[in-house]
Image (cartoon, coloured by chain):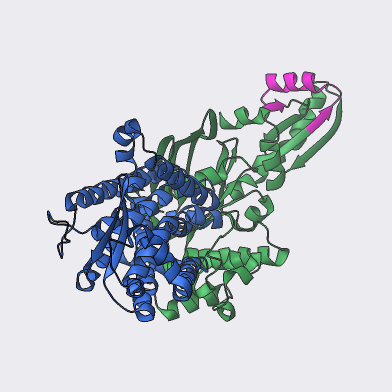
Amino acid sequence: MALIINVNHLSKKFNDTYAVNDLSFTVNEGDIYGFLGQNGAGKSTTIRMLLTLIQPSSGIIEMFGKKLSTHRSEILKEVGAVIEKPDLYKYLSAYENLSIFAKMSGIKVTRQLLMNQLQMVNLQDRAKDTVKTFSQGMKQRLGIAVALVHNPALIILDEPTNGLDPQGIADIRNLIIRLSRELGKTILISSHLLSEIELIANRMIIIHKGKKMVEGNVADLLDPAHTLVEIETLNNTEAAALLQQSTWAPFLLPKNQLQLMMNKTAVPQLINDLVTMGVQLLSVNSSHSLENYFLSLTTQSGNVEAFTN
Amino acid sequence: MWKLLQIELFKISKRPRTYIAFIAVAAIVFIFQFAFKADGQSYMDLMLQSVKDTFSFDRVQAINGYFMCYIILNTLLIQIPILIALIAADSISGEANMGTLRLLISKPISRTQIILVKFAAATIFTIFLLLWMAITALFLSLLIFGAGDMLVFRSKGDESQILLITRDDIMWRYYAAFAYATVALTVIAALSLLLSIFAENSIGPIIATVCIVIVCTIISNINVPVIDKNVKPFLFTSYLVGWKGFFYIGTDIDGKTIKGSLENWPAIRKSLLILIAHIFILVSAAVVVFKKKDILS
């Protein structure tokens, strides 16, 4: 499978702060690649570097096997993007906006092509209306039409469901799935809504404070083998030390929470070992939803080191 | 590049603010024409008061289309920079404000191309605005007031001069003056474009452009030798009214005007070259700054 995006040790520093710090990841052809992180994690900065809006402080970005720094125009012809909210020329109609951006992408523009594109996002009846009369959801759909009009191989969507109502979110989700399954597009989608990514992405990365925390297949990350188990005992510090001496790899978090990333099938064995060690167990909770996984990674800064090493 | 320029011109033509400049020019010109039609004689009496005994000229004939255009240009070419700034200062900052700059830069177009196309579009707007001025201030005035020999009132040092240009020697001077004014106002467009890169809404660059023009114009009008020698030659505002040079007709040793001549063509040529150098520097600076700019809007 061809590598569409290959990011190596990418960093961006604003004054003394790293917005993105030594980030590496790959996106394969046909992937719906989820780019996850809390607000301010560095998702948008990374996407802006992929689209040449921001120049990296260091690191290499390769797309379609070519360096972005030296083959910018060539690469961007194959990329369609919606960056945060899809701001378009408000005083122009949907048709005119689409036409302008299609021409800028260097393709031959026909009325048929533009109308087909508008039809795909269900805006064919509003083609002549100015964008200032559109709802947020309609603007978002038009933004996607603009991103797709030149038939790019890679589509980058930065928080595409921001500000949308549930129906709008569902529409965008279905459109993304269609683009991937029916048209074979590679899609990189950033979001802080994990439930969205969980539903559509096949691979994902989680970043926090500009650093990669984990990257992999969504199915693997949701696999019982990656279950997060939280244990409550009478003395968590002592329990953590005892587990550390055995074959277990616990994390003792700042608020004295004791967690393990492990295969769910091994939970009975863990309980058995704890009892054998004389630990007085109060509760054991396990979870493998991406939401919990994400929160456990990003809300506890103590975990960052554990997962990136 | 041509396709991009077409797109840029299309966008400009669709914005209501584009037409503010044309409406403003037309309004001012019509007010001038109305005022001079109603009571131009008083103005002419005042201007010719000091020379009424030595200079014989039909005062009714003096207020003709050519003279009107000269008066209007004298007034309007000082205000026009503001109207140019309305469009040019919006070039990049307006896109940043709307959020379309992100989309624009993520297209396979180089940033240098974007700046050059924006500059070309602003220049074309300037040309159209001056053409509009020519139509309203010159050709419409000729229709209303008719043609005739033209009087040019001039202050030269401490003395005042009145030059007379015959009607068959005027039109080419207007063509040259409008061409010169286009170059001069293109400097304003280049300055506004450069300033627009630093802002995320167009108000800031418009105000900054106007302030720079005002400050530089004031400095250009300070008559102190140290400023004359060390500062004025480097200010573009010192050359903005250089178009008047095309109406300063050459004279022979008896003081008679020489048809088709210019008093000081080398000075006009030098002014033009300095203005062109300003354009080159400002646009180059815009390209360099824009290429390095991180788009965070």
Q: How many marks?
A: 0
Inspect the magenta stretch and tell me whether residue A164 lies in it: no
**Image position, residue B148 (x, y; %):** 28, 75
Q: Is residue A105 visible?
A: no
Query: Chain A shown in which color?
Result: green
The residue at the point 56 percent across, 66 percent down is A90
Q: Residue at x 47, y 65 (%)?
A: B21
The residue sitting at 28% across, 61% down in the picture is B54
The hue in which chain B appears in the rendered picture of the protein: blue
Q: Is residue A235 magenta?
A: yes
Residue closest to the eye, B82 or B190 = B82
Q: Residue furthest left?
A: B253
Res B181 visible: yes
Q: In the figure, is residue A259 to the left or right of A184?
A: right
Image location of residue A108, percent across then percent down: 35, 72
Tell me where residue A73 appears, x and y as whole percent: 34, 54
Q: Looking at the picture, does residue B169 appear above or below residue A57?
A: below
Is residue B208 placed above or below A302 in the rendered structure? below
Horizontal relation, residue B99 to residue B195: left or right? right
User: At 76% from the left edge and 27% from the top edge, which residue is drawn?
Assistant: A273
Q: Nearer the viewer, residue A71 or A263?
A: A71
The magenta stretch is: A231-252
Quadrant placement of the N terminus of chain B: bottom left
- Coordinates of residue B174 in the picture (x, y in percent): 27, 66
